[in-house]
Image (cartoon, rainbow, N blue to C red):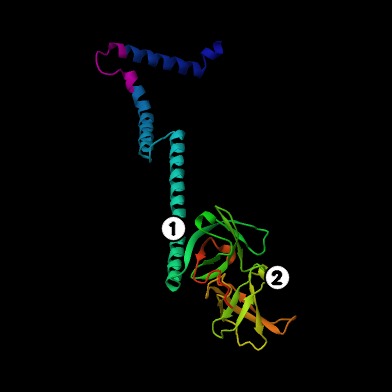
Amino acid sequence: MNRFVKSTWFKVIVAIAALLFVLLIFSAASKKGSSPLSTVFGTVTEPVAHASSGVGSKLGKLPGGLRSKAKYEEEIKSLKKQIAGYQKELADYEQLKQQNELYQNALGVKEKNSDFEFVYASVIGRDAADVYTSFTLSKGSKDGIAVNDPVICGEGQLVGLVSKVSPTYCVVSTILDPKVSVSAYEVRTRETGYVSNTTIMSETGLVRVAGLSRTTSVTAGGVVCSTGVGGVYPRDLIIGTVKEIKDDDHTISSYLVVEPTINIKDIEDVLVITNFEGQGVAVS
């Protein structure tokens, strides 16, 4: 104990206690203003208070200040809703754009064929296992569609014909299907043949036009159209462009390898021709 009393730490503690005692006496004797002790305390704490005030001020100037998590989640939800609205508007715009293009093409076909009557329809289903790319349309018999009605798109490109119909939908067999036969001719030479496809050519998206003579004058690049013979298809519907001319191994004739001017697998909207001059009349 005597050692601690004589130590430097003890002397320092006593000195600090004496100083605080003097300050308390001086504070009690003061009649106005702040006490020296409060002044000393204020002097020590003022830099800290000033720094805190500065930080608070800068935080207050941030965008939105300090905001709750719930507030940000609410804003994110609102922004997602706006984005969904913009996406719908964009989808509607693209749909209207496609329909407008379809209508314009239809008007062009109508100007050339005033006897045509159309029904506009959209593709609503495809059979992925069908190599002949048949598809289902959104219109049916209640819209005036019947079996064997020809189906076109674009500026009069032949797609196929209606093979099955119900009140609210119909099924289209395309020109890639071997069961679909179309009397055809090449526009430059006027030579005629008929669409008679094979499974192998269907898988490559091509059409076989058979029945041409071995001495045919048709060349690659020629355009093939429907003749109108048979009363099922109007005349001059575009079937495609000639890629090759080949000799038939089983007959003495030649056939054309024709590439459709449209990609049948990508078709989304079509026109079903419900009536035209000569429909149902077999012309020889």
Q: Give the left or right position of residue 101, taking residue 281 as reference.
A: left
Residue 222: image x %, image y %?
A: 56, 81
Q: Earlier in the sequence, mark 1 or mark 2?
A: 1
- Magenta segment, which residues? 27-39
Residue 138: image x %, image y %?
A: 54, 55
Question: Looking at the image, is 271 positioned above or below residue 247?
Answer: above
> Residue 225 lies in what quarter of the image?
bottom right
Give amino acid for label 2: Ile
The residue singled out by tag 1 in the image is 96
Question: Looking at the image, is 69 positioned above or below residue 266?
Answer: above
SS category of the residue bearing label 2:
helix
Quarter of the image that includes the N terminus: top right
The residue singled out by tag 2 in the image is 200
Q: Give the left or right position of residue 20, taking residue 244 as reference.
A: left
Residue drawn at the location 25% of the way across and 13% of the way down: 31
Q: Is residue 80 magenta?
A: no
**Residue in the foreground of this view, choosing between 94 and 137:** 137
Q: Residues within 10 Å of mark 1 (few under 14, many from 20)?
A: few
Residue drawn at the location 45% of the way across and 54% of the way down: 92
Q: Is residue 231 visible?
A: yes
Cα distance in 3D space between marks 1 and 2 = 37 Å
Residue 90: image x %, image y %?
A: 45, 54
Give amino acid for label 1: Leu
Residue situated furthest left in the rendering? 32
Residue 106: image x %, image y %?
A: 45, 66
**Residue in the foreground of this view, choosing between 40 and 70:** 70
**Residue in the foreground of this view, choosing between 216 and 65:** 216
Question: Looking at the image, is 195 positioned above or below residue 59?
Answer: below
